[in-house]
Image (cartoon, rainbow, N blue to C red):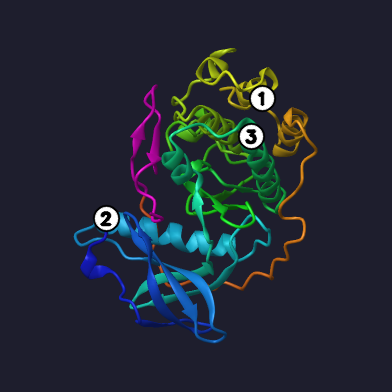
Amino acid sequence: MITEEQLLKVNDVIPGKHSEYLILGLVGRGGMGAVYRVRRQADNTIWALKEMRPPPNTPPDEVEENRQLFEQEAHLMGRLTHPNIPVLADFFAFDGRPVMVMEFIDGETLEDRMIESNAPLMEQQALGYGVQLCRVLHYLHTQDPPIIYRDLKPPNIMITHTSNIMKLIDFGVARTHKRGQSKDTIAMGSAGYAPPEQYGRGQTDARSDVYALGATLLHLLTNLPPVPLQTPQPGAIRRMNPTVSDDTERVIIKAMNLEREKRYQSCAEMEQQLLRCLDTPYVDPTANVSVPPPVPVQSLPVRSRSDRAGLVGADGARMRDRSTSDIWA
């Protein structure tokens, strides 16, 4: 966790590429940086400023790896236009550290919502979020080249207070799918939500995000985190939450199959099954939302990335676990 002394102060003015940004307050801080609520001086609009600022004595290879991931996140977000993805407005270096400015989301994460209620979500509400997630993930998977999110979980999903629109945050682990490559260059993800192939056993693809979506729905409907590398047995979810329908349980079980060939082969396919589980016709909360075009992102000077070992899987496979190291608080 970064220290108080490292934090930017209220009323500090940060010079960006497209505007200056006035610090209004701290939103949250994590292991490698902080997020602030800021006013863009060019037009007096409110945005979120995300700064990478490693704590003192952080190993240089860890700093470099996180810097690369931070820039990769900005490059990915700078080419995406979707109502379930925060708009990127600026990307620049400040005092030698990378900074991005993005849409400020007036809401809370699904994790925070569940902690506050200490109870599972209602099935129909969880299914509605599942449909939104299917649509934004399908959008990512149909990019050229496809983008695999790789870190879907309740802390990375924000829900707006007023419109109930879901926003994916933290694209730090997302990667482009490389045809012909046998496995990911670096295995990263969050234990419980990551499928077997994400533990260094193969290259992740759209079906990897399908698994994580199933694991996320399981968490939302049971208020319990998913067990790493374990597909729920028939009846197990309904024993934890008897209000869950048989149809919804079957969708989750199929999505979380350890063999990706037996999962839904796309998020579009999974979406159709979730829609069938809804009691009433689905109303898209993003239907009338307009999204501005993304801003072009230029690279900042960085060194080469150093691979690091991480979490050891059940069979010895390794994956860098991001469960507690996210830059978002």
Element assignment for label 2 = loop
**Where 199 sits versus 101, above or below?**
above
Report x, y in % for residue 181. Answer: 58, 41
Residue furthest left in the image? 57
For the residues labelled 3 and 2, say whether their Cβ atoms are less than 8 Å apart. Answer: no
Can you see residue 93? yes
Residue 12 appears left or right of 147: left
Give the residue displayed 46% in from the left and 43% down from the top: 111
SS assignment for the magenta stretch, majority: loop
| Disc 1 residue type (three-letter) | Thr
The residue that mark 3 highlights is 207
Residues drawn in magenta:
307-329
Callout 3 environment at 10 Å: few (<14), some (14 to 19), or many (20+)?
many
Report x, y in % for residue 294. Answer: 64, 69
Residue 84 appears in which quarter of the rendering? bottom right
Camera-nearest label, 3 or 1: 1
Can you see residue 189? no
